[in-house]
Image (tube, helix red, strand yellow):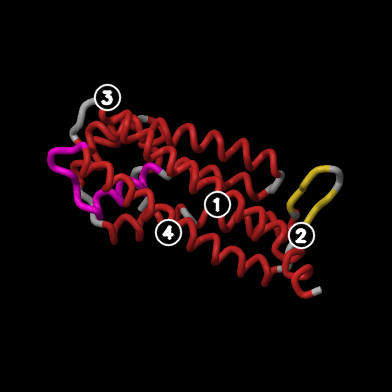
């Protein structure tokens, strides 16, 4: 379980070669990697919002009850899983345009699941949910995710560095869009969810 996490962070080139050789199935990826790692930002956000509360600056803190936070966490978790699938679809679409022998859809989703590893790990900081701290950690996670993507795409699709740059840039742009949506949902669900509901009812 989680056998590739350290390798992707410490020696990604070697780890990408190993991952490619394994030809991992989609089911195995989700069971042993994505389902576990995607829980990191959710669990730590749950702890942070129920025990500490979102700090918005100026002394304003929003703290959720256990049930409210649980509901938000379930939605957040499902959105993260869907985001991995969506990025895999984008990689598959780009592969059909550039690769002579594009990998299967399931292989592209497996690749996307491993690429997202730094983003999953950056969710640890949500245990102390300062907006600026979460944004900083998310930015660092995104930068390392981009690095993994640029390293892995040429060998994964068996295409040139120039073509890989186009594929990686397109995938990264889509990933950033998803990240912005996730960040927005995080603030709404974990920070403002209760306030929005009360305003709608009142």
**Picture coordinates of residue 170, whole percent (x, y):** 37, 37
User: Closer to the camera, 178 or 14?
Assistant: 178
Which residue is outermost to the right?
59
Q: Secondary structure at mark 4?
A: helix
Q: Secondary structure at mark 3?
A: helix
Residue that carries the numbered disc 1 in the rendered image = 182
User: Closer to the camera, 148 or 182?
Assistant: 182
Residue that carries the numbered disc 3 in the rendered image = 162
Residue that carries the numbered disc 2 in the rendered image = 63
Q: Tell me what residue is drawn at x 62 percent, y 40 percent.
A: 135
Q: Secondary structure at mark 1?
A: helix
Q: Residue 84 vs residue 161: left or right? A: right
Per the rendered image, the range of residues in magenta is: 98-115
Q: CA distance from mark 2 to mark 3?
A: 48 Å
User: Closer to the camera, 3 or 16?
Assistant: 16
Q: Earlier in the sequence, mark 1 or mark 2?
A: 2
**Picture coordinates of residue 50, whole percent (x, y):** 71, 61
Q: CA distance from mark 1 to mark 2?
A: 19 Å
Picture quarter with the C terminus: bottom right
Residue that carries the numbered disc 4 in the rendered image = 82
Q: Residue 93 vs residue 40: left or right? A: left
Tell me where residue 160 sits by quadrant: top left
Q: CA distance from mark 3 to mark 1?
A: 30 Å
Q: Earlier in the sequence, mark 4 or mark 3?
A: 4
């Amino acid at each position: 379980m989680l056998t590739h996490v350290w390798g992707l962070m410490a020696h990604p080139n070697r780890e990408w070669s190993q991952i490619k050789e394994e030809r991992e199935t989609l089911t195995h990826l989700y069971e042993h990697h994505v389902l576990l790692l995607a829980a990191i930002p959710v669990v730590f956000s749950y702890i942070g919002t129920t025990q500490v509360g979102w700090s918005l600056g100026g002394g304003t803190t929003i703290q959720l009850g256990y049930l409210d936070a649980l509901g938000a966490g379930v939605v957040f978790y499902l959105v993260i899983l869907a985001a991995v699938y969506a990025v895999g679809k984008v990689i598959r679409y780009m592969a059909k345009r550039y690769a002579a022998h594009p990998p299967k859809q399931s292989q592209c989703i497996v690749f996307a699941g491993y690429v997202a590893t730094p983003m999953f790990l950056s969710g640890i900081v949500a245990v102390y949910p300062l907006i600026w701290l979460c944004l900083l950690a998310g930015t660092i996670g995104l930068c390392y995710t981009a690095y993994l993507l640029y390293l892995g795409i040429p060998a994964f699709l068996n295409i040139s560095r120039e073509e890989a740059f186009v594929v990686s840039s397109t995938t990264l742009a889509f990933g950033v869009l998803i990240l912005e949506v996730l960040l927005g949902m995080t603030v709404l669900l974990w920070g403002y969810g209760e306030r929005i509901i009360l305003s709608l009812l009142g």
